Amino acid sequence: MAIKTAEQYRERVSKLSPRLFIGGKRVEKLTEHPIPRGVIEATARVYELTMDPRYEGFMTAPSHLTGDTISRALHIHQSKEDLFRRLDMARLSAQKLGTCNYRCPGNEMLPSVASTTWEIDHVKGTHYHDRFNDYMKWAQAEDLVVSGSVTDPRGDRSKRPLEQDPDSYIHVVEKRVDGIVVNGAKQHATGAYAADETLVLPGLSCRRGEEAYAVAFVIPNGTEGMTYIGQYNPYTAERECAEDIHSIGNPIYGQRETCLVVFDHVFVPWERVFMCGEVEFTQPLITRFAKTHRMNCGGACKVGFMDLILGAAQLMAEHNGLGKASHIVQKMTRMIQINQTSLACAMAAAQLGKEEPLGSGVFMPDESMSNIAKLNTNDGFWEVLALAGDIAGGIAVTMPSEEELRNPEIKDYVGKYLKGAAPAEKRMRIAKFLQNWVAGLHGVGTYQGSGPSQNQAMVLYRITDLEEKKRMAQELAEA
Amino acid sequence: MAIKTAEQYRERVSKLSPRLFIGGKRVEKLTEHPIPRGVIEATARVYELTMDPRYEGFMTAPSHLTGDTISRALHIHQSKEDLFRRLDMARLSAQKLGTCNYRCPGNEMLPSVASTTWEIDHVKGTHYHDRFNDYMKWAQAEDLVVSGSVTDPRGDRSKRPLEQDPDSYIHVVEKRVDGIVVNGAKQHATGAYAADETLVLPGLSCRRGEEAYAVAFVIPNGTEGMTYIGQYNPYTAERECAEDIHSIGNPIYGQRETCLVVFDHVFVPWERVFMCGEVEFTQPLITRFAKTHRMNCGGACKVGFMDLILGAAQLMAEHNGLGKASHIVQKMTRMIQINQTSLACAMAAAQLGKEEPLGSGVFMPDESMSNIAKLNTNDGFWEVLALAGDIAGGIAVTMPSEEELRNPEIKDYVGKYLKGAAPAEKRMRIAKFLQNWVAGLHGVGTYQGSGPSQNQAMVLYRITDLEEKKRMAQELAEA
Amino acid sequence: MAIKTAEQYRERVSKLSPRLFIGGKRVEKLTEHPIPRGVIEATARVYELTMDPRYEGFMTAPSHLTGDTISRALHIHQSKEDLFRRLDMARLSAQKLGTCNYRCPGNEMLPSVASTTWEIDHVKGTHYHDRFNDYMKWAQAEDLVVSGSVTDPRGDRSKRPLEQDPDSYIHVVEKRVDGIVVNGAKQHATGAYAADETLVLPGLSCRRGEEAYAVAFVIPNGTEGMTYIGQYNPYTAERECAEDIHSIGNPIYGQRETCLVVFDHVFVPWERVFMCGEVEFTQPLITRFAKTHRMNCGGACKVGFMDLILGAAQLMAEHNGLGKASHIVQKMTRMIQINQTSLACAMAAAQLGKEEPLGSGVFMPDESMSNIAKLNTNDGFWEVLALAGDIAGGIAVTMPSEEELRNPEIKDYVGKYLKGAAPAEKRMRIAKFLQNWVAGLHGVGTYQGSGPSQNQAMVLYRITDLEEKKRMAQELAEA
Amino acid sequence: MAIKTAEQYRERVSKLSPRLFIGGKRVEKLTEHPIPRGVIEATARVYELTMDPRYEGFMTAPSHLTGDTISRALHIHQSKEDLFRRLDMARLSAQKLGTCNYRCPGNEMLPSVASTTWEIDHVKGTHYHDRFNDYMKWAQAEDLVVSGSVTDPRGDRSKRPLEQDPDSYIHVVEKRVDGIVVNGAKQHATGAYAADETLVLPGLSCRRGEEAYAVAFVIPNGTEGMTYIGQYNPYTAERECAEDIHSIGNPIYGQRETCLVVFDHVFVPWERVFMCGEVEFTQPLITRFAKTHRMNCGGACKVGFMDLILGAAQLMAEHNGLGKASHIVQKMTRMIQINQTSLACAMAAAQLGKEEPLGSGVFMPDESMSNIAKLNTNDGFWEVLALAGDIAGGIAVTMPSEEELRNPEIKDYVGKYLKGAAPAEKRMRIAKFLQNWVAGLHGVGTYQGSGPSQNQAMVLYRITDLEEKKRMAQELAEA
């Protein structure tokens, strides 16, 4: 069984030394800084869940390359069943972590690379697919964390890459006998600095003349020329300041931590390059990733998050003595509806999944349903946040620090005046957990993950067969 | 193959003579009155579709009783696959008819009767299930239209049956050696007067003391004591007046036609009685019907209707010269999202379907997802109507009669001033078809079919495991 | 007092003989055809309300031209107070008629003509304003019904008038010494055939070269060359068929009845022409009408309609025995919120109203708020319809004819099975009244009246000062 | 002119020494701690705006007690005009501060105390109103900041005060000759520790037997027995950590800072007590405050915030090069609609305002419209946040610290990769400002301020005259 333990991951990560900056300062040791530590804890927990016999069959999968049992995070979907199990994995991780499962993003790119390298080779006689399979065999055997990066900084979005600073999108600046040299950056790279590897895909559908931008590759953590600049926001500050992390909203696993990854003349050997110049295949590559990601992100990961929010909102209502009040029941029912709807769309995407391209063996979810899973979640997640915010009440943002419960001068006041139908500590913990959602980063994160609503709307309109619906209407109307 | 032709159905129906009133008058001959004629045309069309080799496999199914190929309208779901195929049948029928497939409602009750008679017998040693199977073998062999009725008039909804006029709900008034005598009525009985048979289920979950109300049976069209009182509304009047039905919105198949079916001391022989007094099984019986119906009605039938509305709205925009305008694209995209979302929920209901009770062989969709399919459709269908109404514009309600196109005095004016980017007749036909939806009966019909929103909301809240979600949230919050 | 009685109006209208067609047939006598009769009854009722001392001060106003007390339907707004009173008039009429107050549309155009003729004269030295004032003095003295028409057929909406059939928009085909000759048509002309006069405004903002289309005038009912083609829809048929109109949803006043008014070489004398060729003033003229209309239509007329729907929905719930059920309370509360919100926007439009242009004496509502009143009503009205449809239940569309209550063969059944917590007749009347809304013409009518949502959205975006908001944000963000 | 300068306020506040804890530590000096400093800066800015001649007439008002020109923050509404000007004040403050105007909450309570003391005296012959007027004369002359507190901790919300820990609601524990002694606490007390005074109202409508809880009084900052426990959340931490506050979202004025104010046997002299035991007047007192607060909070304060969010969202879109993209225009239009709608409801509340009780001279806004202003804002504000979050994109939460722009090792990378159509610093500032909203405290704050949605919904339903609407519907339906 090619599955490593959380301890083995921790050991590997303890040896990494990426050039990482957070909040204006260099992070010398990943494992000693509270922010990367949250990423490492979350990742390690995923390794534990993978080992847990209760989750066998969806946290693991048989490798189609070797037959070995591997982590599903490194699996290439071979069937509809695989798509359904992928949803189970994403939802469970979200429920158990309350933040990003840092093995996810790469995992959603790998099938698109598998499918597209197969297709490029098929059409153009190249050998990307064998290269990719060799890479995958190794990565699966070592059970690596493969982080994924797709979003370029883009500068002025109204301009193509060559109409502005050429580094606004990652591109090849030199081709050598042994490999390529790339320049540019990727943003929103989730957990990249604590991953073994980073897989890089083009962030735009390239046109003729933009060959340098049609580049996909994978690179080890901390390769020369790479700099990681971590996100910094109020939640970063809170965690850095906390004397006891248990007073924080999601104490162990924290926020989804991303970074800007800069590639400054970074060398990538050919065996790690999976596309280089095939502009006509950037669109399929991106589209396949997008639909896989939108299914999981929209219809499973956020569903797991919403499970947590629903649970916390109900607890809060009960701690307030209002667990059965009719307006609470009504709001909870609406939240359940939203949550299940997102899940349903993802399930339909899996159910309508197909091998793509035929012969490749790689299964892709249905594009319409995966985009709809994400569209529904975009609005639905915010509505759930709003409903949970209403149920939680002001305490979710006006609450004093839990530290006050240990402040001898005032702890009695806090204990007395923060209690409800439950003791103050219990109630504050849930309020703090809810704060993490209703006044936190995940609302925007939901839009950002797999792209803004307009992208999904445009895809949806483009791929819908309105002609068929017109014919049906005409058949009846003009009878 | 136990499938009859449309002609065979027409012949059978031409011999029926139910005691039917529409608009204050007795209908003497079903086939000669424009309202029943629409019902008959729609039903006949379903027979045609069932014969059509293109739809083989979902308009037909193998009988689990005889192995014969039968109409899926008389099939008892034996697998998840059957639930998926049922969705295909419902959506296709809706697309092809633009109104009720009159074989549907009964079809959604039959599996619940199969499942519940099996269970009653299992628990109480009765023999309802054999009786039901005998009936089904005959009905399948004859390929009958089995209409279904479930909604009692209910009188004052705040009162139980025994607290008010006892006839407010159908009940047994006499038990004889050879059968039972029932009194009461069922409303919203869809197409009952043009069906071969009517299956009657209890409309409420009975309590001890209400044994007389726990009654299920099937009865032939026009049995003595039965009176059918047809719905009457503006669309009835329009069809009765029309010199040429082609000027009407859905010319051939018309509206969903329902009636109030009165049972005035009607005798039902024991071999047609499938429940009689087992109050504790009324809840399962109704619930199983409801979830099956909500899956189909919410997530397939109305999806087919929305397909038609989308097609017509796009045609209208094109006939106005605005097919590609950005606000039209945006509205169409929203409509597509709504439509696919309803479908996704129904698919998830099928995907999560299970045998119920274990051992019965009968498959039921997931209760949560089927209720959500209906809840989403309730609001979604109205939003689609509103969007289509906005795209259609005032012409959908202010349009002159198509007769004016044949009025020599003014036909040139009408041709000139009703044209758009398409000729007047073409544009008027689509506007008229849209009128049928955006100013028609289907908005309310969507709520009525399978019950008002509050029913679904209550079920949803009741069956959701909030305790599990609370535990998940606590695990993280109190870490 | 220059106010006429309902009887005087009836007498005038009995002498009218417009060339009118409904449902493919010529209407010989307005007062004897059930459709025009509804229009006449509604108009007569407005005359009665105007006479009613309870409504003095808002159904009447002092003429700014003569000082006489006139019907507010012919008043030119001279103050914010006038705008507020106009709202009172519109809401009361809607509440009392349940359909169009046929004196409204013209009334919303008159101030825009007053304002714009004043401005044209001011800028160009013409004499339209005096002409208009002379006309108004006469119309006020005679207390005429001045209907208004603005929407041209438009043909292919992607084309300007001169790029297609030139008659797609009304235009001058000949200028004579004594007047002009016009060709074209207006659609959705509300109640035009039973009005004394029809005021015609350009339906598009004209550009240079389109001078022939920049034409505004007023014309007496039935002028030679005019043909009226009435709308025809299921509600028309129902009314035509009804033996007793009391069995219809809104028995006395019926639907908003519109027609296509064709102008086939119609001569208009100069004293009735208020714009002729001043293309640069078509935009102000239309905009002023639009904002006045959107305030009233969105924020008062539909508010009155929603008052009726709310009342009927609550009655229906009570007749079902559910008047106090928590889900009914919740739905009613939402409906109240929607209704009051629309009203609030109209009130804000009045409150922010201003003289426009300065010096003209004519008051116009705020453009942003009036457009928002309409935008909110567009969606809100449909949501109210949906909620009312859910409360009403299936009976709103599946109910038998009230005639059945007089059918000796089955009246006992109907009485028994249609009753609720109220007798059948009472309950059926309310259900029928609700049918008129939830399965009727008013949903689409709400969009059509004062234009589709996209118009209002475009205006709103265009007139909002985003630069100011940007400056505010920058002041804080870049502090 | 009884208006003090910002400097005079700063001097007063520098002398205050409330017993204040934030984040587990005692705050020794208000002016030296970054959190109170934000409150002081915001309050000082309000003093500046009050002095600004551009805002004369709405930031100031003539005292009805002395005729002096006073800050409107201490004015008792004497007319509808005052209500309108109050809206202007609230909106301007919100636009200029991007956070709470800490003089607001007290200001919304003062008129309710004026009105209710007048009424109590009138009915019961007490002398609260004179007392209150004496207090007001002094507070106006000194131009004090009067903070307001109303929300008790409430413990188990399903229980009345006497059914649980009696301190869950503030109450009188001793009546002395010279005054009363109170126990309890108030939560969500906005800016109380930097205000001169705190006005305390009962937080529930009291019943007979709960006389001790029917207590209203005003108390100077830092009175013996008072302890202030400040809120602590990620934004607190960020501000505490910041080397340069200009890198924070709303740099100068920060978050709305609240605290839990504990009253541990606090003595209040009689001249500062405005209600003591008159249980029957707690409901009017609270209701009057609630409607005033809901009008301002819902329809002006949040409108000012939304102005800022709209401006920032548009700037962000422009900095991304997408200022005119059609989906941005559509989202901005929707945001404008929401914003104006909230304002319209507040304006209608002012317009329908009345003296209450008659004779008191105090004007109150319309209760229905003020509750609707808040209800619309509740949902609307979250929708605006969601739309702004979608426009802002991931950068609003994944952005590195602005400190990185000053980090010599990587500032070039940050400058290069964070730029858009605008330089990195400009773009980051706006993104950071948006973060403050879309991932900040204001979403929940919007619900909390003036109470959760359910409160407003219940009031709205209760005060709406459904009987009148039923009569209107009946008049037409039963014609």
Image (spheres, coloured by chain):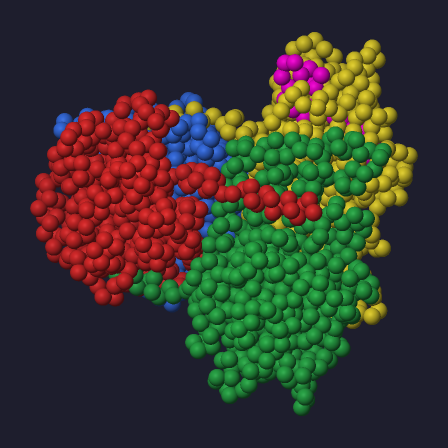
Chain colours: A blue, B yellow, C green, D red
Residue C263 figure quarter? bottom right
Relative image position of residue D206 (x, y in whole percent): 34, 31
Magenta stretch encompasses residue A286 = no
Is C421 placed above or below B306 here?
Answer: above
Relative image position of residue A472 (x, y in whole percent): 71, 51
Q: The N terminus of chain D lies in which quarter of the figure?
A: bottom left
Foreground pick, D293 / D66: D66
In the image, farthest residue toward the bottom: C177
The answer to whether residue C407 is left or right of residue A349 is right
Foreground pick, B312 / A388: A388
Relative image position of residue A29 (x, y in whole percent): 19, 39
Count how many numbered circles sit on residues in the image: 0
Residue C366 figure quarter? bottom left
Is D182 placed above or below B123 here?
Answer: below
Task: Give the residues drawn in magenta, as a range.
Answer: B193-214
User: Which residue: 82% across, 33% down?
Assistant: C410
